Image: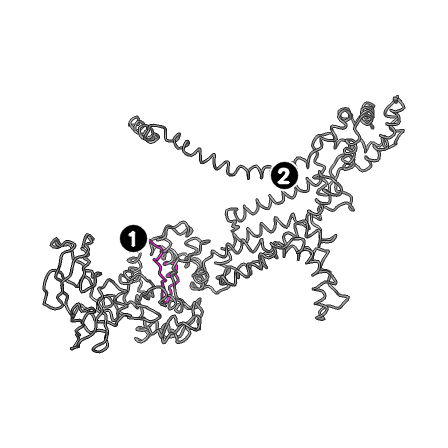
Amino acid sequence: MNSESEKSFVKFEKIDKSYDGEVLVVKNLNLDIAKGEFVTMLGPSGSGKTTTLMMLAGFETPTNGEIFLDGMPISKIPPYEREIGMVFQNYALFPHMTVQENLAFPLEVRKLSKGETKEKVQKALDMVELGDFGTRFPAQLSGGQQQRVALARALVFEPRLVLMDEPLGALDKNLREQMQYEIKHIHDRIGITVVYVTHDQSEALTMSNRIAVFNDGVVQQLSTPDILYEKPENSFVAQFIGENNRMSGTIKSMENNYCSVELENGAGTVKALKVNVGGVGEKTQLSVRPERVSLGSDGNGENLFTGKVEELIYLGDHIRVRLDVCGNNEFIVKVPNEGSFNYNEGDSIKLNWNSDDIRALDPVN
Amino acid sequence: MILAFFNWEVIISTTQLLTTDGIPLKQSLKKAERKNKIRAFFLVFPLLLFIFVTFVMPIGDMLLRSVDDAQINTVFPKTFEEYNKWDREKDKLPPEEVYRTLFEELATGEKIQIGRALTRMNYSKSGWKSLIKKTSREIKKMTRKGMVPESYKETLIEINKDWGDPTFWYSMAQMVNKQTPIYYWNAIDRTYDQNQNVIMQDEKRRIYVQTWLKTLKVSVYVTFFCLILGFPVAHLLANLPLRYSNLLMIFVLLPFWTSLLVRTTAWIVMLQQKGVINGVLVWLGILSDDGRLQMVYNETGTLIAMTQILLPFMILPLYSVMKVIPKSHMRAAQNLGAKPAMAFWRVYLPQTIPGMSAGGLLVFVLAIGYFITPELVGGKDGKLIGSWIAFHLKTTLNWGLCAALGAILLAVMLVFYWLYNKIVGIDNIKLG
């Protein structure tokens, strides 16, 4: 194996997909996934992420383009010969088989010997800490346990990569978080390539090496979680990942990496990082994260505004302050709860942010 | 230590068993629930009554009737009493007392009651009816004249020499009890010989065993064909888009909205020798004009028509089961490396067992007791046990035999139900 196929173990090349010949569900998808990587496809429902996963698994055929796995085109290979493990949304455990029989199924169809099958099944069950549950039926397990069985079943036949289609969607919040770590640890331990689909951004941020943000059939941005959060390249990503404060305006001037933006309804001028904008006179949307705004000080004098405290929400470790700033009364600031915050609702407050922390992005219609 | 534990438990239990007002909890709960229970009872009461009157009572009556032999005992009570004293080892014919009581009971008995008893007596030995009818006439004449015989035995034998035939007297042994198994023996082609041993009927009178076997065979075949034909349709119904599946469902349900009689006669039109199917085959040149197939008024016709009529009872339970099998299961199986055929066999098919067994049981139970269709399209060859029950009910009025046939039918169904429960488990049934 050369380094080229190491880097693009899975390769989507110019993939288009349409179900009805009228609407493209996936548009010109180009994506490389390296061996051992944990890549998440994140996006709202209907964004094409599950379709992409199903094309990789072989249950849907691309309308155009080719998918390569380990350098080989796989569009013509039926799903049962692809050697790709998959965890389904509702686990798809076979209800008439015990946990052991579920896990033994992929090994039996591969005609492994009885002894080897038994050994591998037990190993896989131990891996998900369900060693003693082999003789139970899926209906006798809790949601979290079923999830683990599904994971073990997808891994037991040592597939080339594992796909997961919103595997934690049916679990409650605590269990979901716990399973996120477990899946991540299993990935770290056995080093298998994982393609994960979710619409839950915190899940994506927690688990992934890289995240592909899908919207409208197009990958909006493909980056590591930190880049995605801190340096979103367009308004959709900024809005979809984490919280942000949005302001619309018109570009007045540009110099180096910055631009000066006049806010709508004459609320002032903001100096912002130039990321994804047209020329002078064009519209733009500004985005600043709530934790990058500081309250009550002048800072370095840039982007200094005054706002009115509309609402205070006490969240224990931090206080969420909703402000009316520049005509936007949904402006959120997160203040760490260190005991020094003593404003009340209705107070006027000074606020500022660094021009590197506010990003000028494409306008939203 | 033990005492302390005991005390602690008492305290706990007494405190737990009282409500805030100090009334025992159970009593309070009962009181609270009584009203609901009474209301629930009154809600189901009409149905309970209905089921009792229309289901439990008729079946009970049928079971009683199948062994009932009381009527004849009310006609000849004294004769039977004397008859039981007869020692067959010692005397070839019954003692004088038997002849005398019979003579008197025939002389005084009600004509209608005697008539009914005669029918029953003929079941045990043919010849009884005419023997007694002739004898009664003579006895009536004698009593009208006021004649009292010196020896009843000799007088009766004089009237008809059959009274000296011990086999008639032997057969009376079958009637003296108020219960009799004779109808059950008749229902499986058995009868009694002159020594009251159970033997096979004459060869030309054996009809029921072969009919029972045919009924079972036809029911099994119909169930099998329904399964083979219904499975793909149910699968299609469960997996087509709603728009198409609704249309298909109407086709499946259409037979339900058409009269059974109309459908059955339609099959006659289709299948008869000058019928539609034969006509088309001859027209296409597949059959020669005198090689037309005999497809109706025989077992083939029964099979075809019954399969079509019972098909919905297989499709609907199958459909309701298939509907809830997630599509992801077949995908998961293929993803795990199983070819589509293997995925179907190992993952899909086992999950349809509740539907197959529900449909199978339903079709089988309906088929085994089916009457109208086999009666109309079956001819002589395709008649099932239901036709014989109807025949005896309406034509020969042998209700005892009807009841016995019905009871056996019930028993066969219960045996199949029991087998089914052993093999598949009744919890696995799913009707919708």
Identify the element where label 2 is drawn.
Answer: helix
Residue B79 lies in quadrant: top right
List x then y, in percent, for residue A7.
30, 73
**Which numbered dot is residue B174?**
none
Circles 2 and 1 on the same subunit: no
Q: Is residue A13 left or right of residue A364?
A: right
Is residue A161 on the magenta stretch?
Answer: yes
User: How many residues crowd around disc 2 within 10 Å: few (fewer than 14), some, or many (20 or more)?
Assistant: some
Q: Which residues are magenta?
A: A151-178
Chain identifier of the residue bearing label 2 in the image: B
For the residues bearing labels 2 and 1, Cβ distance under 8 angstroms: no
Is residue A323 on the magenta stretch?
Answer: no
Identify the element where label 1 is drawn.
Answer: helix
Q: Is residue B85 visible?
A: no
The residue beneath circle 2 is: B59
Indicate the quadrant containing the N terminus of chain B: top left, top right, bottom left or bottom right. top left
Q: Is residue A180 visible?
A: yes
Judge whether B1 appears above or below A150 on screen: above
Q: Is residue B219 left or right of residue B355?
A: right
| Residue type, numbered disc 2 | Ile
Residue B194 lies in quadrant: top right
Front residue of A30/B351: it is A30
Indicate how the structure is coloured in the image: one colour
| Residue type, numbered disc 1 | Asn
The residue beneath circle 1 is: A174
Q: Is residue B141 left or right of residue A328?
A: right
